[in-house]
Image (spheres, grey):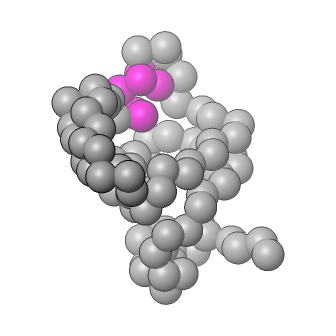
């Protein structure tokens, strides 16, 4: 379980599982399209994905952090479209 305070000041508690654990549970390590938009916590989720063991063909990620910070994590795997 994890919790955070919403923009409306309410605490939200939600059970969470790493994406990789879910993929293993359904016997998949390849994802065609992955969309991530969780209001500022995107990098925390991305850091839990072992990209050397999961093949995500297309990623759509809302950036709530700086582009250089995202590039520092993703390196050459990141291509931006505007």
Instruction: Give the main secondary structure of the magenta stretch.
Output: helix
Residue 71 highlighted magenta (yes or no): no
Report the front residue among 13 and 46: 13
For residue 79, above or below residue 1: below
Residue 30 on image: x %, y %: 60, 33
Q: Quadrant of the C terminus?
A: bottom right
Q: Is there any visible trace of residue 52 in the rendered image?
A: no
Query: Residue placed at 21% from the left, 38% from the top?
Result: 2
Q: Is there any visible trace of residue 75 in the rendered image?
A: yes
Q: Residue furthest bottom?
A: 68
Q: How many marks?
A: 0
Residue 67 on image: x %, y %: 54, 81
For residue 18, above or below residue 60: above
Residue 60 horizontal side relative to residue 6, left or right: right
For residue 58, above or below residue 66: above
Query: Residue placed at 61% from the left, 69% from the top?
Result: 78
Q: Quadrant of the N terminus?
A: top left
Report the front residue among 74 and 41: 41
Residue stretch rendered in magenta on the structure: 19-24
Report the front residue among 65 and 71: 65
Residue 7 on image: x %, y %: 39, 56
Q: Residue furthest right?
A: 82
Q: Toward which corner of the image does residue 47 lie, by quadrant?
A: bottom left
Query: Residue placed at 49% from the left, 70% from the top?
Result: 64
Residue 51 horizontal side relative to residue 76, left or right: left
């Amino acid at each position: 379980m994890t919790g955070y305070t919403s923009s409306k000041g309410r605490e939200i508690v939600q059970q969470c599982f790493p994406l990789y654990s879910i993929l293993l549970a359904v016997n998949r390590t390849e994802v065609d399209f992955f969309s991530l938009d969780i209001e500022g916590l995107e990098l925390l989720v991305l850091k839990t994905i072992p990209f050397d063991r999961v093949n995500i063909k297309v990623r759509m990620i809302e950036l709530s952090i700086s582009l250089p910070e995202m590039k520092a994590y993703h390196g050459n795997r990141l291509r931006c479209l505007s």
